[in-house]
Image: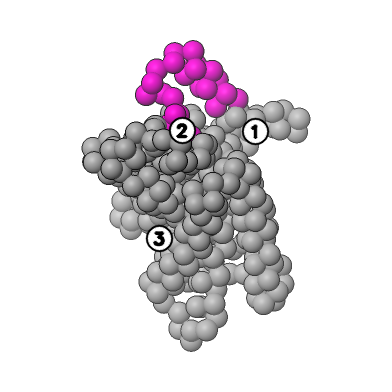
Amino acid sequence: MNVLLTFLHQAILQGIAILFGATGEIMTEKSGNLNLGIPGIMYMGGIAGLMGAFFYEKGAEQPGVVPGVLISLLWCAVASALGGLIYAFLTVTLRANQNVVGLALTTFGTGFGNFFGGSISKIAGGVGQISVKTTASGFQATIPILSDIPVIGRLLFGYGFLTCCALIIAAAATWLLVRTRVGLHLVAVGESPATADAAGINVNRYKYVATISGAVIAGFGGLYFVMEYLGGTWANNGFGDRGWLAVALVILALWSPAKAIWGSFVFGALYIIYIYIPGVSRAMQELLKMLPYVVTILVLIMTSRRNRPEDQPPASLGLSYFREER
């Protein structure tokens, strides 16, 4: 029982970073922009938040938890928004190829994170010496009484506030897309920008706002991983393929933030299941690591065969909009 509870708890911890990235990418793709730069933006958000907390704690005589958390969140949001702005400017205003720009942004963001991570490691005294325990303690704080409940306390309440924020943001994004006029306009822009433009909707504005806000949400996934999961430390290339799993989760969730919630937990479980299976060889472990992508492919095949409109990506996804061709 303890092993099962530990596995489920770790699966949720693994899935939250993926959920942040998937929710941000869903909001972006609903506008018709295919941002493959999400993995890089997660790196940018993670290292920026860590740097903000590091320099704050380094410069303050008695650093506080609340100021450290707020500074970290602010730096993360600014860096992630900058990544989203770069992508939006190149693809919406300059109409550059979205796939190329996204992949270039991932390469840039990963290098950005590793470069500055290595730089502040040297300032801190060497590789692996970065530590922002004061700020990280604010991210890792759990609900005092509820998390101490035997058996289920740690499973249901043993998480920091960013875990709750991930669930709230995904639920709010679902409500926005389904129940509000802004959401319906955003969906219209992603399905047919020419029709939306003819109806008086500012297509470029919706694309910019969706892309930048989606990048900020994804950046919080990087901050979550650095602060809550790793406890305020940095390791180059430490995110692994979680950013790409977030992009894959968009397909598994059928472009629905609500479905991405349970999908992220499934991905989190599949991501670590090889650790909890006894007697698994090294070669079999590598095969088991492929499970999230195999599941994504199977879901894509099934949805393609059903061909239901609500299960399909936005019709204009990945395509630049030329108003003169309307």
State the residue position of label 3. 141
* Residue type at tag 1: Lys
* Residue type at tag 3: Ala
* Residue type at tag 2: Ser
Q: Is residue 156 left or right of residue 34?
A: left
Q: Quadrant of residue 183?
A: top left
Q: Quadrant of residue 255?
A: top left
Q: Is residue 112 left or right of residue 180?
A: right
User: Could you tell me what secondary structure mostly forms the magenta stretch?
Assistant: helix
Measured Cα–Cα span from mark 2 to mark 1: 32 Å
Q: Is residue 172 left or right of residue 79?
A: left
Q: Is residue 252 above or below residue 244?
A: above
Q: Position of residue 97 (x, y in %)?
A: 59, 43
Q: Residue at x 65, y 65 (%)?
A: 117
Front residue of 165 and 250? 250
Give the label, 3 or 1, closer to the camera.
Answer: 1
Q: Residue at x 51, y 71 (%)?
A: 52
Residue 289 numbered tag: 1
Q: Is residue 269 visible?
A: no
Q: Is residue 184 visible?
A: yes
Q: Is residue 80 left or right of residue 156?
A: right
Q: How is the image coloured?
A: one colour
State the residue position of label 2. 316
Measured Cα–Cα span from mark 3 to mark 1: 30 Å
Give the label, 2 or 1, closer to the camera.
Answer: 2
Q: Which residues are magenta?
A: 294-317
Marked residue nearer the N-terminal end (2 or 1): 1
Q: Is residue 139 above or below residue 242?
A: below
Q: Residue at x 51, y 78 (%)?
A: 57
